[in-house]
Image: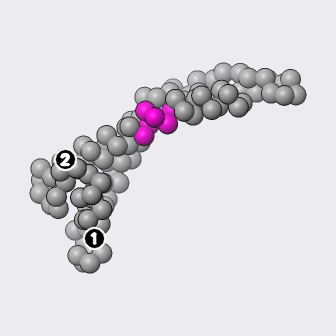
Amino acid sequence: MAAQKATATDRAGTEATMQRLNWKPVTWSLGLFGAVTFVLCVLYGLVVPAALHMTQFLEITLPGFRWLSLGSFLLGLVESFLYGAYAGLVFVPIYNFVARRFA
């Protein structure tokens, strides 16, 4: 289950239902989003002319990535997944804190 329900009382005294995020599905979702996005960027780079590549951006943001070998592709795929997972691990506690505080 991606969200847990909690109740909070607003200023008018009525109870409102608040959704708490579960870190596991959010982290996996963002990790997979990062990996899929990386694959799409590489496919884009293979299809379009070299002048339109995102090669330099990928090489700057993904340590150790160099265009394009199998080892480099796998490294970029893992790093992209980890960047997305990191975003989920950071976002969920912040969201839950803010939702609890201001609901």
Q: Residue at x 26, y 78 (%)?
A: 51
Q: Residue at x 86, y 23 (%)?
A: 13
Q: Identify whether 78 is placed above or below 98.
A: below
For badge 2, the amino acid type reads Leu
Q: Which residue is mark 1?
A: 53
Q: Tell me which label, 2 or 1, sits earlier in the chain.
A: 1
Q: Where residue 95 is drawn, which disc sits there? A: none
> In the image shown, does 101 or 25 lie closer to the viewer?
101
Q: Identify whether 73 is placed above or below 88.
A: below
Q: Determine if the magenta segment contains residue 31.
A: no
For badge 1, the amino acid type reads His
Element class at badge 1:
loop
Q: Residues within 10 Å of mark 2 (few under 14, many from 20)?
A: some
Q: Determine if the magenta segment contains residue 89.
A: yes
Q: Is residue 18 visible?
A: no
Q: Residue furthest right?
A: 12
**Residue 57 screen position, x and y as percent:** 30, 62
> Taking 34 as reference, is 18 left or right?
right
Q: Which residue is mark 2?
A: 75
Q: How many marks?
A: 2
**Structure colour scheme:** one colour
- Contact between labelled residues 1 and 2, with CB atoms less than 8 Å apart: no
Q: Residue at x 39, y 47 (%)?
A: 33
What is the span of residues highlighted in magenta in the rendered image? 87-92
Element class at badge 2:
helix
> Taking 7 as reference, is 28 left or right?
left
**Residue 50 screen position, x and y as percent:** 23, 76
Would you identify the image quadrant in which residue 44 lies? bottom left
Q: Residue at x 71, y 21 (%)?
A: 7
